[in-house]
Image: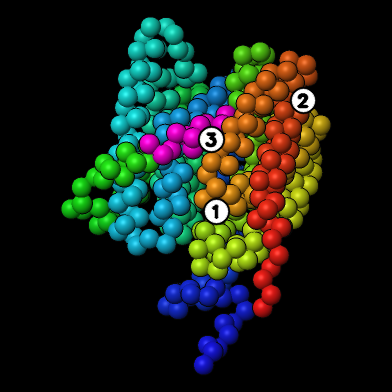
């Protein structure tokens, strides 16, 4: 006897004890989009505050710290998080929690070693932090732990919890930071902003404890699992470095060639364009990742192809609409808010938004490779694109400055899209089985 059909919009297999609204197919994507939109709103408000109250130089230095906070989890992650995100899919909470715990043991050990090396370099005058060294070090340490936990929660099918914690550390602290600067001019500094960020990260780590409590008690750290992932993850590690390098290398080239103020202008426009990437990733790509893995595992290649095509179509349609809205809003609203403090360049913003749109479609194909376990092909593509993007970025920035940086972003995204589409062509071109 066939089961009765579910009411429209209700997810198959959803917990029947949950309220109807929470079981609706659109609830999680809409909730993730709302949370990430709120976080992005806070972060963009911070960018405006830094540009207007502290100047483009402070905004540029904040952008360098922001980039380092994104690079640190990858540089010190050794490629293990890549496997963690896939291995926790479909696992019981206790097993997934133990995997996350074991991964964090490696993370903390790497962070402590890197911190000791960094302190020696600062003392020797070989490294100059863009702000207070202790605050920068605390941010890098806690962001790395938070990143690993975020990836694990998404793989465990808990993107809503992951994005709530992301909002806690990525947006909830912005209003207090701005409020302190507006109320007391003595507190109007980049160090105060970083102190608020650090406090939010500490609260985020405390909020993670209930997620892990009861899942790891009485079980030893699986050193064999860690060693196996380290041995098999070198190519993936290079892949991860390539991805984060392509995302953040341009600002460091600009800082070296044109100074912190030019980097501040870049960060202002990048913050708008990056909002497009974050919103679409949170509402569509991240939510679809476990489904792609399960579609391949349970339904075969036909189910996987349908799932990937649906995801790519939704990504393209959503990203195009949001890009147009962001472009219009930025040109109409920002000049009134910033005045001459930070001019908005329509051409620069258009190129960056186009780059992010192409990158989102390329990311959908990247998740296709990831869900198939095509790790070697995925890594080779990203490494090749990264090796091409570095000299390309240097040449374009030297020739056209800020606009050259935007052209570099667009060229790199287009190259990734072409390479990933070529790699997936045999899998996507297979005919559907005859029923």
* Between 80 and 45, the one nearer to me in the picture: 80
Q: Can residue 198 be seen? A: no
- Bounds of the magenta segment: 231-245
Pointer 2 with pointer 3, Cβ within 8 A: no
Characterize the local packing of mark 1: few (<14), some (14-19) or many (20 or more) Cα atoms within 10 angstroms: some
Label number found at residue 239:
3
Find residue 115 and report its image quarter.
top left
Residue at 67% from the left image edge and 14% from the top image edge: 258
Residue 63 image offset from top left, x and y in percent: 57, 27
**Is 395 placed above or below 270 here?**
above
**Is 211 placed above or below 22 here?**
above
Secondary structure at badge 3 equals helix
**Is 47 placed above or below 92 here?**
above
Label number found at residue 403:
2
Residue 94 image offset from top left, x and y in percent: 30, 59
Distance of label 2 from label 3 (alpha carbons): 27 Å
Find out whether residue 271 is within the magenta segment: no
Of the two numbered discs 1 and 2 in the rendering, the one whose residue sits closer to the viewer: 1
Residue at 79% from the left image edge and 37% from the top image edge: 350
* Between 224 and 211, the one nearer to me in the picture: 224
Residue 328 image offset from top left, x and y in percent: 79, 44
Secondary structure at badge 1 equals loop
Q: Residue furthest left?
A: 218
* 84 sits to left or right of 27: left
Find residue 336 and report its image quarter.
top right
């Amino acid at each position: 006897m066939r089961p009765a059909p579910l009411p429209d919009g209700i997810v198959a297999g959803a917990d029947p004890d949950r309220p109807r609204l929470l079981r609706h197919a659109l609830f999680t994507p809409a909730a993730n989009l709302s949370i990430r939109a709120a976080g992005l709103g806070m972060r963009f408000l911070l960018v405006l505050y830094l540009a207007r109250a502290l100047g483009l130089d402070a905004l540029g230095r904040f952008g360098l710290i922001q980039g380092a906070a994104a690079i640190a989890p990858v540089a010190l992650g050794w490629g293990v998080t890549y496997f963690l995100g896939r291995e926790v899919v479909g696992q019981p909470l206790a097993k997934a929690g133990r995997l996350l715990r074991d991964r964090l043991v490696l993370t903390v050990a790497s962070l402590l070693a890197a911190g000791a090396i960094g302190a020696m370099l600062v003392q020797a005058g070989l490294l100059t932090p863009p702000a207070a060294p202790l605050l920068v070090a605390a941010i890098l340490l806690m962001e790395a732990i938070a990143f690993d936990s975020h990836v694990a929660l998404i793989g465990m099918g808990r993107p809503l919890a992951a994005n709530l914690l992301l909002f806690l550390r990525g947006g909830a602290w912005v209003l207090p930071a701005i409020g302190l600067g507006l109320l007391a001019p003595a507190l109007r500094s980049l160090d105060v902003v970083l102190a608020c960020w650090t406090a939010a990260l500490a609260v985020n780590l405390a909020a993670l404890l209930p997620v892990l409590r009861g899942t790891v008690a009485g079980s030893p750290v699986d050193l064999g699992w860690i060693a196996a992932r380290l041995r098999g993850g070198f190519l993936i590690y290079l892949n991860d470095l390539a991805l984060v390098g392509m995302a953040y290398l341009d600002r460091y080239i600009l800082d070296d060639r044109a100074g912190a103020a030019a980097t501040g202008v870049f960060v202002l426009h990048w913050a708008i364009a990056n909002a497009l990437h974050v919103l679409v990733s949170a509402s569509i790509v991240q939510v679809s990742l476990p489904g792609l893995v399960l579609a391949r595992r349970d339904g075969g290649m036909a189910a996987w192809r349908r799932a990937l095509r649906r995801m790519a179509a939704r990504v393209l349609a959503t990203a195009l609409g949001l890009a147009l809205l962001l472009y219009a809003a930025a040109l109409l609203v920002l000049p009134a808010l910033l005045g001459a403090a930070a001019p908005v360049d329509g051409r620069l913003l258009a190129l960056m938004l186009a780059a992010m749109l192409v990158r989102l479609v390329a990311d959908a194909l990247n998740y296709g490779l990831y869900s198939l376990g095509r790790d070697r092909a995925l890594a080779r593509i990203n490494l090749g694109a990264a090796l091409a993007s570095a000299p390309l970025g240097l040449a374009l920035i030297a020739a056209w400055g800020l606009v050259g940086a935007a052209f570099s972003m667009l060229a790199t995204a287009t190259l990734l899209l072409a390479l990933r589409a070529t790699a997936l062509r045999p899998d996507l071109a297979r005919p559907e089985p005859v029923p």
